[in-house]
Image (cartoon, rainbow, N blue to C red):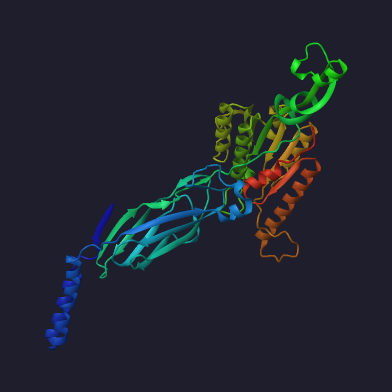
Amino acid sequence: MTMADRTGNGEWGIVATLSLAGIGLAVGSQLLVAAATLPLWYVAAGVFGTRQDATVRLERRLSTEERAATAGPAADSADSSSDVVAGDPGDTVSVRTTVRNVGSEPIVDLRVIDGVPDALPVVSGSPRTCVTLEPGAETTLEYGVELRRGEYVFDDATVRTRDLTGTVAETWTDPVAGNDTVRCSPAVEAVPLGGGTNDYAGEVPTDEGGSGIEFYAVREYQSGDPVSSIDWRRYAGTRELATVEYRAERATRIVCVVDARSSQFRAATTEQPPAVELSATAAERTVETLLSTGHPAGAVVVHKNQLASVSPGTGPTTRQRATNLLRATWQSDPAGAADARTIHGDPLDELPQVLPGEAQVYLFSSFVDDQPVDLVRRLRARGYAVRVVSPDVTAGVDTDAAAPDTGADDLATRLEAVDRGTRLAETRTTGARVVDWDLERPLALVLNDAIGEVGDR
């Protein structure tokens, strides 16, 4: 929609004309009387002037170059649409919007504002420009926006032009070709699995014979063995029946535990998401990946006086309930459309009671206090395989003792970073696999590092 307006109503020109003419007559200056006509010409240009015939074409390109260079093609969004660019919370998306004058006349005063989503802060450059463009010429707006959790669509650009006198302006919104959608929902390409299996058939090799594809052993034939498992080649040579066994493969039941106590609402900076949001995001992507490969998975969220859980399963209902629970976590909704129960005392004491006995546990916590360390010790004592993903909300703090003091607050923060590192080291001594999540790294790489082999239960 195009709107034309005029910057003045001409009253100032009449006042200026009368003033100059009056002064010229009073002092007898023919020059001032002649100059009094100039404002009238300017006003006439504004009154009778027409809109400038301006035609522009805009094209936008979005990219996460740093993420692509670090993680490679496998870390890109799972969405195959070329119009969607994906990243992790805190990633910077580079935006290049090209504006070209495709008309036949020069545009003297062209102003463009790109349609940046309100929820995405601009962290570098500017989505605005004011230029003069000759026919066929172009200019490019380059800026960066910081991702927030969710999906966002860029709006049409706002374009404004003025004529040579500056008295006639027109404003309209113009569609922008190219990319227009960013999604902050990081994908996990693969989740390797370790010990801690159940009796369901799956992808994790075990030390027992059964149905599978890898050879395990040959034993004496027993009545009732399937015909397809008989070693017919051996029978042809020895006339003795034998049964071939293959290495059994079991499914791994995994529970993602998210620490959502009040200490987890701390963020590294005011511009970055809090630890609880980072943990819930990582847990959500892990659960989705596990379920997509057929592994029973569930989730537990630990609040101050409440535990909310979704029991491990493989169906779409489990997926939806786990997603609802984890997305509600960083929005301070304890119930989260899942099974929740109020507890009295330390919630970490109650957690082992809601975990299946054969499950693996993935714990997501920033470890800014001692309780997660105590939890890992208890889980390991009960025989659980534990893996930890810990977002570093003390990132950027120099823990070098030789670093100069810049104030009591900086010193306290450095001490917190040192204490957190000590807690992670203590957690590793329990046999748990621990990944210290540097927030500058893509989430896909962090989870791939976190989910390597661990010892058997």
Instruction: Report the quarter where the C terminus lies.
Output: top right
Q: Decide if residue 15 is in sight here.
A: no
Give coordinates of residue 207: x percent, y percent: 81, 28
Q: Nearer the viewer, residue 12 or 324?
A: 324
Give coordinates of residue 23: x percent, y percent: 15, 83
Q: Nearer the viewer, residue 53 or 311?
A: 53
Residue found 52% across the figure and 48% down from its top: 148
Image vertical order of residue 391 relative to residue 134, above or below: above
Compared across the picture, whether 13 is left or right of 113 comes to left
Give coordinates of residue 91: x percent, y percent: 56, 52
Compared across the picture, whether 281 is left or right of 450 comes to left
Compared across the picture, whether 307 is left or right of 146 comes to right
Q: Nearer the viewer, residue 242 or 404?
A: 242
Q: Nearer the viewer, residue 407 or 73?
A: 73
Q: How many marks?
A: 0
Q: Decide if residue 272 is in sight here.
A: yes
Residue 259: name its quadrant: top right
| Extreme residue toward the bottom, this view | 28
Image vertical order of residue 162 relative to residue 94, above or below: below
Residue 211: name its quadrant: top right
